[in-house]
Structure formats: structure tokens, C-alpha cells
Amino acid sequence: MQPSPTTRSPPCPSRPAFSPSSPCSPGCSRRSAAHPPRPGSQAGTQAGAAHRTRVVVRIAHCEGCEVSLQQGLRNRWWSTTPRRIHDGRAVFVVPSGRTRGLSVSVTGTWEASSPHPSGFQAIATLRYGGVAAGERVTFAQARTKRRGSVCFPGTTADRLVLRLNARKVRVAGNGGPALTTLAWADPQVRTMAGTQGRVYGGVFGAQDIVPCS
């Protein structure tokens, strides 16, 4: 039976999938390979010498919300330490190569008061199915969406600005009703081809770093 947006948690697009009874909650553990290399390692030295991009995540009306960047490519799993939105933005400086397959997790401040865990981490949908890059999407429109991609195609630019919206929504979590975050790019942005996945009521949820290839 196909769940409705307000009665079931979004399914996890990552591997492995999860059920609404999964014990995983927002902030669930990442793969050990997802952590950046140690500064003294060869990979760390190469990354330090690489061109870097300043990634600015802007979210209006979400002061104090936590965001993190993650990259999920074949044989490359990586994520940043979460940062709080301050004065409407959070800034990350990362190697430009990390921006291919980049996605943004968003945890709203309201999730701390959720009566039950949602069982997933909310990920910002960068482009919904049927919506072109550059188009604006309202909250009401986002709630009707059933497919979307969270995977950024990458950039070598010195600066990347991702403008997001975030709203508190209620889902059926683990053990009862839960609060989670519907986050989406507004305007919508380019995404990697072939990465559209299922969303429920506009919400894209994952239990791990989202695989973009």
C-alpha cells in the first residue's frame, strides 16, 4: 500500500533501505570511510593542495538549524562536521572535487522537541521531478512532489551558494508521530543525471550518506 505524506516516514534512498520501525534517528552513524583523511595522510596532503570551493548554504527562517555536507560516490564517502545556521547561513570550505555528488543534510531546531524519532535524516532536495533548474518552488508545491534529486553535479568555482527553504513537517516516526524537516532548493539547481529518487510529501530522507553514483 502506498503511504501518504502525513502517515508514513519517507523511505531511505541510501543503501540499505529502512522501514518506519528502524531505530535510526537523525544524525545516525556514518560509514567509517566517510570521515575526511587524517591531515598527515597522503590523501590529506593531496586534498590540501587541491583547489577549494567556498560552499555557502543559505536558509531563511531556520536560525540555529544544523546542516552538513556529504559526498556519496562509488568508492568515495565523505561528510563534514555539522554547522549551525547563523545569520541565515553556514559556510564550508572544501576541496572542489568534493562537490560532485554533494548533498546537504538539514536538521531543524524543532526536531529536538519531537515526541518520537523520525527514523531518518532529512536531506535537501535540490531539484524535484518535473521542475527545471532555476524555477522557484513554494512550500505548498514541494508538499505535492513525489520524486527528486539531492545530488549536486559538482563545480570548480571558487564559491557556490545553495539557497534553501526549510519547514517543520510531521510524519509517522518510530513509535509515534515525529517532527522532521522538509528542505528544498529555491530556486531549484542542476543535479546529477539519473539520481531522481522517491520523496514523500516533498521530504527526502536517508539513514546514511546518499549514493549519487
Image (cartoon, helix red, strand yellow):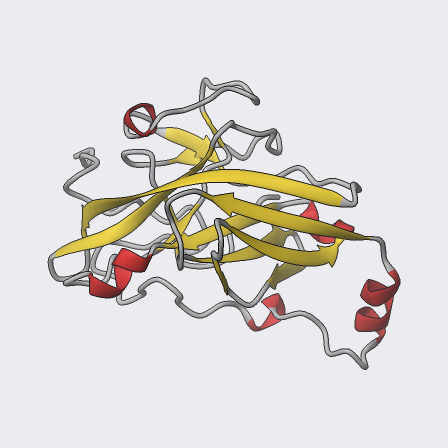
List x then y, in percent, for residue 98: 70, 53
Q: Residue at x 65, y 52 (%)?
A: 74
Q: How many labels, in total?
A: 0
Q: Residue at x 48, y 57 (%)?
A: 86
Where is residue 45, by image quadrant? bottom right
Left or right side of 148 for 75:
right
The answer to whether residue 59 is above or below residue 72 is: above
List x then y, in percent, for residue 102: 61, 47
Q: Residue at x 43, y 37 (%)?
A: 184
In the orientation shown, which residue stands out farthest toward the left? 176
Q: Residue at x 45, y 18 (%)?
A: 130
In the orientation shown, which residue stands out farthest toward the bottom? 40
Residue 201 makes an appearance in the image:
yes
List x then y, in percent, for residue 149: 49, 35
In the rendered image, the quadrant that contains the N terminus is: top left
Left or right side of 47 for 62:
left
Where is residue 161, by image quadrant? top right
List x then y, in percent, for residue 147: 40, 29
In the rendered image, the quadrant that contains the C terminus is: top right
The answer to whether residue 197 is above or below residue 84 is: above
Q: Nearer the viewer, residue 84 or 88?
A: 88
